[in-house]
């Protein structure tokens, strides 16, 4: 029986593909113009810095994922290290919320690429219509079942990686070296740090490896390797894409084409064909990421409701057997897409994930102190300092540049705590660990 089950598990490179396919999703297509607007010629440097930041967090995920084999991933890490409490429950809610805001990011990116292809103006009316229809279509697809789309995911990932490969290989030869030379003056470096904090979310898919650890062969070895390999592969792709984009298109033109910057950057060396190629690749990529995120977000909402983290309304079955969590997730995603711009949505997503990362790192340190997890304290503490600095930098940028997004971020934190405190007080539910043979998992104690 074990042999048969093992044959169905993910190998190392399948786990790496899972993470890489998620990380190289919509963000590189949708946020390149925003990054150029903030970091300017230092955009490639911002991707290097955000990659180092991701590796520092990945160190804790790798160490904990090698010992704690559970698809609950970071939430179980936090429960093991810091125990059960209102904050832990609030973090579970915030984890679901990160899926909601990611949907808004994808919807805005899809509209940004589709409207120019159709020759339509990117005004509020057309953008709102596209965002609404886009999320509605994938909601319908999910509650009818995404099995057919799931079979096509491999080919969609292959298409988007091929598009980026063509972009890099053909564009690297026409790069203007002076356009990609880093600027180290105070203003440029400050803006580079802002971009680093925002683009950190482009790497956040590596955590999915720990959410699939029960289904990975030899997880004690393969989970850490998959995390490190996926971050390194994605980092190289991101830096090369940024070099080609900034090195081929004048900065003001890249910024002007903020919503479809990668397609515009392909024009100097591939002409109209390059523009169409990258635009189609972006639409494929964003669609793939949206389907996976909406499905995952609805499943997380369902699981949290089942285990008592969210009200039962998220677990209740409604039309066509879908859970209300699906419709709530999609509806809130549309709300953020309609009422926040691209920079605001990206900032909220990155802020929420950074808080979860900080708690994972703190849990790693506690488990290391108790002798329950491997690690070097200097690396753990350094990671905590780096991510804390990035978080504060992002909050400053949001406060000064995107006040509505700054307010929404902190309202989300407060609401998560309030909802968890009220629900926990009303139900009296607690979470404890259950130690079984494999894997160990969270069990609800009512």
Image (cartoon, helix red, strand yellow):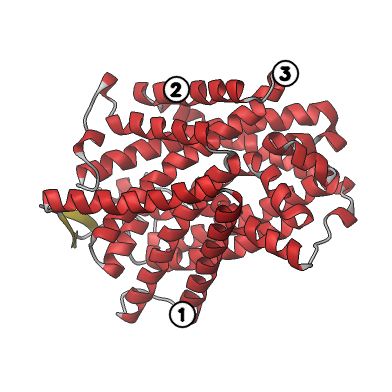
User: In the image, residue 273 lies at what x, y percent?
Assistant: 80, 27
First along the sequence among labels 3 and 2: 3
Marks 3/2: CA distance? 22 Å
Q: Out of 363 and 442, give the one closest to the viewer.
A: 363
Locate residue 364 relative to residue 19 in the image: left or right.
left
Element type at marker 3? Answer: loop
Q: Out of 14 and 8, give the one closest to the viewer.
A: 14
Above-or-below relation of 245 to 389? above
User: In the image, residue 191 lies at what x, y percent?
Assistant: 69, 59
Q: Give neighbour class at mark 3: few <14, some 14-19, many 20+ (Cα, 10 Å).
A: few
User: In the image, residue 67 lies at what x, y percent?
Assistant: 34, 67
Identity of the residue drawn at 54% across and 52% down = 201
Q: Are marks 3 and 2 in contact (CB under 8 Å)?
A: no
First along the sequence among labels 1 and 3: 3
Element type at marker 2? Answer: helix
Element type at marker 1? Answer: loop
Q: Is residue 12 visible?
A: no
Name the residue that disc number 1 marks.
Answer: 376
Locate residue 260 relative to residue 111 in the image: left or right.
right
Q: Out of 36 and 56, give the one closest to the viewer.
A: 36
Name the residue that disc number 2 marks.
Answer: 136
Q: Give neighbour class at mark 1: few <14, some 14-19, many 20+ (Cα, 10 Å).
A: few
Name the residue that disc number 3 marks.
Answer: 119
């Amino acid at each position: 029986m074990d042999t048969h089950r093992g044959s169905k598990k993910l190998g190392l490179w399948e786990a790496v593909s899972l993470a890489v396919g998620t990380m190289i999703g919509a963000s590189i297509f949708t946020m390149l113009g925003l990054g150029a607007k903030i970091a300017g010629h230092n955009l490639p440097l911002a991707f290097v810095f955000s990659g180092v930041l991701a590796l520092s967090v990945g160190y804790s995920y790798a160490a904990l994922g090698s010992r704690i084999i559970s698809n609950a991933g970071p939430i179980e890490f936090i429960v093991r290290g810091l125990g059960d409490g209102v904050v832990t429950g609030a973090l579970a809610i915030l984890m679901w919320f990160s899926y909601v805001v990611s949907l808004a990011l994808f919807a805005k990116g899809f509209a940004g690429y589709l409207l120019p292809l159709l020759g339509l103006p990117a005004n509020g009316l057309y953008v709102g219509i596209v965002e609404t229809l886009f999320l509605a279509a994938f909601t319908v697809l999910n509650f009818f079942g995404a099995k057919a789309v799931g079979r096509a995911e491999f080919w969609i990932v292959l298409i988007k990686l091929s598009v980026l490969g063509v972009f890099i290989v053909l564009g690297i030869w026409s790069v203007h070296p002076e356009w990609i030379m880093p600027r180290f003056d105070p203003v440029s470096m400050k803006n580079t740090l802002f971009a680093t904090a925002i683009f950190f979310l482009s790497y956040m898919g590596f955590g999915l490896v720990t959410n699939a650890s029960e289904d990975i062969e030899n997880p004690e070895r393969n989970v850490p390797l998959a995390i490190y390999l996926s971050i390194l592969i994605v980092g190289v792709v991101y830096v090369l894409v940024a070099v080609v984009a900034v090195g081929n298109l004048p900065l003001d033109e890249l910024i002007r084409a903020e919503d479809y910057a990668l397609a515009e950057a392909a024009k100097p060396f591939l002409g109209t064909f390059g523009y169409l190629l990258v635009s189609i690749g972006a639409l494929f990529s964003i669609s793939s990421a949206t389907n996976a995120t909406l499905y995952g977000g609805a499943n997380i909402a369902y699981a949290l409701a089942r285990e008592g983290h969210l009200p039962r309304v998220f677990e209740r079955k409604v039309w066509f057997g879908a859970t209300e969590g699906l419709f709530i997730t999609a509806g809130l995603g549309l709300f953020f897409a309609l009422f926040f711009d691209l920079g605001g949505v990206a900032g909220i997503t990155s802020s929420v994930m950074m808080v979860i990362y900080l708690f994972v790192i703190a849990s790693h340190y506690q488990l290391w102190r108790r002798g329950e997890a491997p690690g070097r304290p200097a690396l753990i503490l350094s990671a905590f300092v780096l991510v804390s600095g990035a978080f504060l930098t992002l909050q400053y940028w949001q406060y000064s540049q995107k006040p509505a997004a700054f307010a929404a971020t902190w309202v989300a934190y407060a609401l998560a705590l309030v909802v968890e405190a009220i629900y926990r007080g009303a139900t009296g539910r607690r979470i404890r660990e259950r130690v079984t043979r494999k894997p160990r998992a969270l069990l609800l104690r009512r």
